[in-house]
Image (cartoon, rainbow, N blue to C red):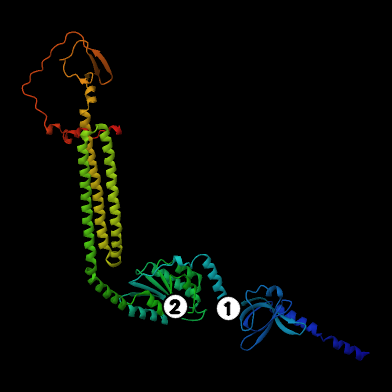
Amino acid sequence: MRRGGLIALEEQKYLSVTQLNAEFNEMLQSQFPSVSFRGEISQCTRAASGHLYFTVKDEKSQLSGVMWRGMASKLAFEPKQGVEVLCDGKPNIYGGSGKFQVVVHRMQEAGEGLLQRRFLELKAKLQREGLFEDGRKRALPSFPKRVGIVTSKTGAAVHDIMKKIAERMPSTEVFLYPARVQGEGAADEVVAGIRYFQERHGIEVLIVGRGGGSLEDLWCFNEEVVVREIFASRIPVISAVGHEVDVTLSDLVADCRAPTPTAAGEMVVPRRQDLLQELDRAERSLKNYEQWFYPYAQRMDELAEGLRQNFRYRLQYARSGLEQLRGDLARLRPDRFLRDQHQRGEALFYRLRDGIRRRLLAESDQLLRYQQSLERKAPHHTVRSYRERLEVLERRLAEGSRRRVQEERHRLRGIFEVMQALNCERVLERGYSLVRSGDRVVKSAVGLQGGDLLDITFAEGAVRAAVAGEKRQTAPRATSRPTPRPTEKSKQPPHPRGAEKAQGMLFPEER
């Protein structure tokens, strides 16, 4: 009995495997409640249950991990072999196999994978705000005198840019703001450089960039503060970051993107030799200017002379019509004649005006065609000078036509007033009366007999009267000189100059 009891007591000090794993688990979790580690996934399996089992390794060791279905379903990327990850979890000894593992509750991509995700998220955000719209981007100045550069003073990029500018346009002044373009604080220095040039040195265009590198090396130009500062710049900005295959957010927001720093130097200034060649071509073209310009100038003179002749013809035609109307005036009743002539005068005026307008429009169209031809071949100031001369001629022609028609209307009004003064009805209105005996107008009492009937017409109304009593003979009053016989000159109506006081009165139809 003693021997068996000793054996039983000795066996009691041994723990079962399950108990030992539990003890280890408790001690491990009390010492390390949470762990964070970094490594590369070498194996990864997603079970039918949705749980994720994987192995994370580095150069010398590896570690097993598990992520339960609830956490694994929320991953923003697909874990697979070769992906470097950052993990946070709780250490654990799996009782089933006694295997040490980490129960991971948070996993994210490390290195460029994480940066790429941040790049896409920031790009989408800024794109929604409209920072990448092409409509807001400005054109680069054609001949900038001062260029600013924000980059590292020791990198190859600044030397490539300045060398290319010196080759193409040696007279261009270049100002450098040295800034770190990689690592912590680089973004703030690039922002400071952009702000520095906004109010200093009279910079006309700004180059921001660096040489090639990895996504992490170029990350400074994906920082939001740098992108927004380029967007707010009042100076046009060229982004020259990395090589042609490298695309940063600074490239998207800048007014112009250069595939390399060297290309930025070519893009910012024109090539001096090209400008000199262009000037030579322009000089040769100007020497041949007279050969094709003077025929057009001669055609302009011909058109102007044609307009003057047309005006003289139209004016002579109108004057002949007025003279004919004046000759017909004596054969017509004054009020009807003046009304008809007034209408004909207005119709003639409108015909003259419309004819001149049509001719001017036709000539204007012809001149416009010549003008367009001249604009394609001649300096603009010469065409503008001829256009101004044509406008002056048109205004003078229109004003002369209106003035001449107005003068003729004034003359017609004077003639109308003279005819009104000679109208017999106006004589009656002054107190006179018209006496008729039958169809004969009575001019003297001689020849009248007692009882003869007379028709007497007044300004208003008429009466019939009979001759009564003795008739008195009245001798004509002696005059000192004989009454002159009317001549052809005296029969003509008074000169229109005598009707000047009647100007401003209305025609009968205008009252």
Closer mark to the observer between disc 1 and disc 2 = 2
**Residue 261 position in % (x across, y down):** 42, 79
- Mark closest to the chain's N terminus, 1 or 2: 1
Q: Residue at x 28, y 62 (%)?
A: 370
Question: Residue farthest to the left?
Answer: 480
Horizontally, residue 409 falls left or right of residue 258, namely left
Q: Between 393 and 137, which is closer to the camera in this rendering?
A: 393
Mark identifier at residue 113: 1
Q: Residue at x 30, y 52 (%)?
A: 358
Q: Secondary structure at mark 1?
A: helix
Q: Identify the residue under disc 2.
A: 259
Q: Between 84 and 394, which is closer to the camera in this rendering?
A: 394
**Residue 3 position in % (x across, y down):** 91, 91
- Residue 198 visible in the shown view: yes
Question: Residue farthest to the top?
Answer: 469
Quadrant, the C terminus: top left
Q: Amino acid at mark 1?
A: Gly
* 84 up-or-down from 474: above or below: below
* 236 up-or-down from 24: above or below: above
Quadrant, the N terminus: bottom right
Other residues around mark 1 within 10 Å, as few (<14) / some (14–19) / many (≥20): some
Q: Quadrant of residue 170?
A: bottom left
